[in-house]
Image (tube, grey):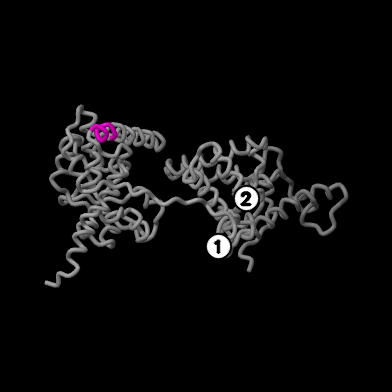
Amino acid sequence: MITYSISIYLDKRRPKSNGKYPIRLRVFTPNPRKQKLYPTAFDFTEKEFESIWLTTRTRKEHKETRLKLQAVENKANEVASQIIPFSFTQFEKKLYRKVDDGVKVSYHYKEKISEYKKYDRISTADSYQCSENAFKKFMESKSQNYDNLTLLDINKEWLQDFEQYMQNKGRSLTTVGIYLRPLRAIFNKAIDDGEIEKELYPFGKRKYQIPTSKKVKKALNKEQMKKLFQAKPTNKEQQKAKDFWFLSYNCNGMNMKDIAQLKYKDLTDNKIVFYRAKTLFTSKTDLKPITVYLNNYIKRIINTYGNIEKLPNNYVFAILEGNETPERQQVKIKNFTRYINQHLKKLCEANELPGAISTYWARHSFATLSVQKGATMEFMQESLGHKDMATTQSYFAGFDDDTKKEFAENLMDFD
């Protein structure tokens, strides 16, 4: 069922300097009732418009102009017919782009990167940019122009060649997967938008499967946590790194971005209530805040490092100032996270603890130790702010040997 109408329209609201009126492309939808006028390269007098377009018998000298005008209307109808359900946004995007943009890989990457930057999702935009850069270099290695690459060129064999190319350069399968997931998302979007047929989708069963590796559990056990907590930093940088790592641990494994963006208005009634920055974009429905009750450790860190002016809209910590662009915010948060990781690593290496430790380990350690202490997976799902249980389970590093031994010894204890 067609839910729009398209026509050529003489816009007589305001004549141009030559005394003629601009010709518009009129698009109308009855439900909701909406009309939009789009510019064309034509302008006519009323008499010219009648003799060129409205008449059934066009004079010979006007036939070429009529054909060009007809081509504009035909293109608009062709574009609109591919948009189901009809959307003005999609119509405008497709009408004014180049003919083959809909299948160009570079076009889709540009669209997605612009979209993510528009909504301040700088980290995701960076991930897409890194993915695109990898494909550019791959095409260069084949002496081919990336700008000519289309979604129609990418099939199982092409993806396998890319995987082999990356491995030959010493990249892991995990990295390959990181670069290919944005491309898969682009294919899904292109199919949803009617750019390509579903049969051309190159991923999935009996096609190309993106490499996945079993996640290494990045959690410290109880003994290691105690050792790290009791470790004596050799300088103020190590002390700060240790303090913020344990702050993350105490705040349900809160990541550094959420710590950096924490404001005093988020601290009420002896607790922190916040939404993960990540889920504000990935989970629009049924958003649930995460609640962290302030214990003595959290209060001490806030008192030590917190901003003196406790105005509601002030950041708790001086990681951000508040006047940065989203791009600059991202840089500052990355630099702060790198600072914590560098100095924490030195502290751990000096105390015979895992040198690969990072801020991310605080989140996994919180999840693992909480479950080992008896917390249910449902409780952890809520505490970590996950939408599905599978994600929560992936954070759990399992039970240590002492817990398993204690469990075995108590199997016959029925009291």
What separation in Å lies between label 1 and label 2 (alpha carbons)? 22 Å
Hey, what amino acid is under mark 1? Arg
The reply to whether residue 415 is visible in this rendering is yes
List the single residue furthest toward the right.
60
Q: Using the rendered image of the protein, determine whether residue 102 is visible from the camera's viewpoint.
A: no
Label 2: few (<14), some (14–19) or many (≥20) C-alpha neighbours in 10 Å: some
Q: Which residues are magenta?
A: 345-350
Q: Height in image: 1 above or below 258?
A: below
Does dot 2 land on a helix, a strand or a loop?
A: helix
Point out residue 226 in the picture as x, y percentages from the top left corner. Answer: 18, 43
Tell me the residue that label 1 is attached to: 33
Q: Is residue 276 magenta?
A: no
Instruction: Decide which of 216, 325 is in the foreground and name it.
Output: 216
Number of labelled discs? Answer: 2
| Structural crowding at the residue carrying mark 1, measured as other residues with C-alpha within 10 Å and reported as few (<14), some (14–19) or many (≥20) | few
Of the image marks 1 and 2, the number of the one nearer the N terminus: 1
What residue do we see at 66% from left, 48% from top? 153
Q: Quadrant of the C terminus?
A: bottom left
Residue, disc 2 = 94
Could you tell me what secondary structure mostly forms the magenta stretch?
helix
Residue 398 falls left or right of residue 37: left
Along the line of sight, which residue is nearer the eye, 304 or 71? 304
Name the foreground residue: 174 vs 401: 401
298 horizontally vs 262: left or right: left
Q: Position of residue 219 (x, y in %)?
A: 29, 47
Label 1's element? Answer: strand
Left or right relative to 164: residue 373: left
Q: Quadrant of residue 166?
A: top right
Q: Amino acid at mark 2?
A: Lys
Residue 15 placement (x, y as % from top left)? 66, 43
